[in-house]
Every structure is written in C-alpha cells, then in structure tokens.
Amino acid sequence: MTNERPRPVKTTKTSLALVRAVRNSDGAGLSELADRLGLAKSTVHNHLHTLVDEGFLVRDGDTYHVGLEFLPLGEHARDRNPQYATARQRVHSLAEKTGHEADFIAEEHGRAYSLEYAVGESNPRGLSESGPFRAGNRFYMHNCASGKAMLASMPESRVRDIIDHWGLPATTDRTIIDESTLCDELESVRRRGYAVNDEELIAGYRSVGASVTNPDGEVVGAFSIGGPTYRMAIDESTIEEIGQLLLNEIDSLESKLF
C-alpha cells in the first residue's frame, strides 16, 4: 500500500468527456466531438466505438446519442438511499399544493443533482419555459435555492472545500460571485430557514429552497419550489409563505424518516 494519491486515468477521462459532450449536444458527430474536445478524429473514433460496443452510446447514422445502458446505473444511483424515494413523493405533493414547479435535489462531490421534478397546474409546460431542471441535471451549489440551502446547513469547512474546488462561476448577471457576499447570504438563509434564488441560476426564473437534514445534522438534500418570474412574485409575503410551506413539509418528512 502507498499513501500516494492515485493519478486520473486519461483514457477514462476522455471517454467520460465524450459522453458528456454527446449528452450536452443532444447528439453529436465524430468531427464535432473531435473539434470540441481538441482531439484527433482517430482517438475519438476509438472511444466512440468502444462506448457503442458497451451500450453506453448508440449511433444513428453519423450522430451519436447517449445509450440506455446508463438508465439502470442512474436509477440505482438515485434509489440506493431509501430516504430519497420518500422525499421524491413529497415533490409531487408540493407541486400540487402550490401549482408551481417543485424538485428534490441532493449534493454529491460539491454539485447539486436534481433527483425528482414535478410541475403544478399553474405551469403546465413546466421548466421548458425557463430552464433545464429535469431529473438528473447538475448545477453549481451557490446559484440555486436548493444549493444555497444545503450550503447553509453544511460545516464551514465543507463549504470552503466546495468553493475552492468549483469556484463561484456566474450563470446570469445576478449570480453571487463574491465569496464574502455568499457568506452573508448563507447567514441569512440560516436565520430564516430557507434560501431564495432570484434569477441567479437562469434569467427569468425564481425559486425558494430549504434543506433536509438527519438527526446528526448531515445534509440529505433540499426541496425547492419555483417557476418563471411572471408566475413567482418576489414580494416578501409570497416568498415567506412558500418558505414556511417548505419548512412545514420538511419537518413532517424528517419526523417520518428519522
């Protein structure tokens, strides 16, 4: 045994980068992928051939798409914790109660992952109008309501590690990109119990989020309620009403889970 930190395997990282590029493009060809990743076409071709052979990509003419082999892996990752299954049921209840969009998000490796998403009656077309919030999507922690709620419930050392690793990239002109400002924001979240995202992640979208913790204070995930700005008022009473609804729902959930 050695204490030396393992070095990343370059070929594995290349294959994963190709899969992500295919997914982000909703399908891509060999030349496009080679140009995007700055790789030789022969190298890309070998990786694509292997991924297709293993079922992780499929080829439709000259275009590659993500394959169904990822589906059981994603389902397993999402369902390995039985607490998530119970939490996901509450997402649909929140969407029904509020008429807005609701989701449950968990943190892994310092990023926020959407595990479940539901749409209320007031927004029948859902987030297709305002952004990519489908289950499985990944976000930074500092610019979404659920992410800020989880950060506010984490030890300062963990928050520091996440910021050091991922930084505070801007996705809109409202994104908090200053560390001291984010720290002040997280303190406000701790005081009121919930976080607010006012067009910080996506222009034209607002949300309110609150974290779920176990009896040891460990963050399990977070719920959020949101929607397009023309449906989600920013006045204090509306935000407080939604925040309190989330906190009540989470209190009920935590009492059943733990």
Image (cartoon, rainbow, N blue to C red):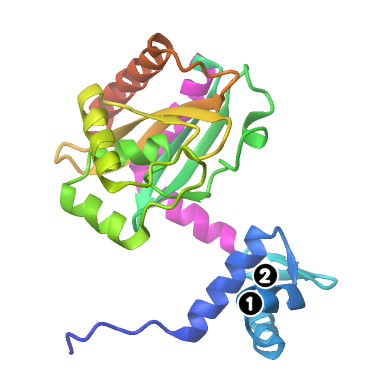
Magenta residues? Answer: 70-97
Residues packed near mark 1 inside 10 Å, few (<14), some (14 to 19) or many (20 plus): some
Residue that badge 2 annotates: 57
- Residue 39 found in image quarter: bottom right
**For the residues bearing labels 1 and 2, Cβ distance under 8 angstroms:** yes
Q: Nearer the viewer, residue 12 or 163?
A: 163
Tag shown at residue 51: 1
In the rendered image of this protein, does residue 62 appear above or below residue 24?
below
Along the line of sight, the residue nearer the viewer: 77 or 191:
191
Q: Residue 56 lies in magenta, yes or no?
A: no
Relative to residue 2, is residue 173 depicted above or below?
A: above
Dominant secondary structure, magenta: helix
Give yes or no for residue 75 being in the magenta stretch. Answer: yes
Horizontal side of 18 relative to 165 (left or right) equals right
Q: In what quadrant of the picture does the N terminus appear?
A: bottom left
Above or below for 16 versus 79: below
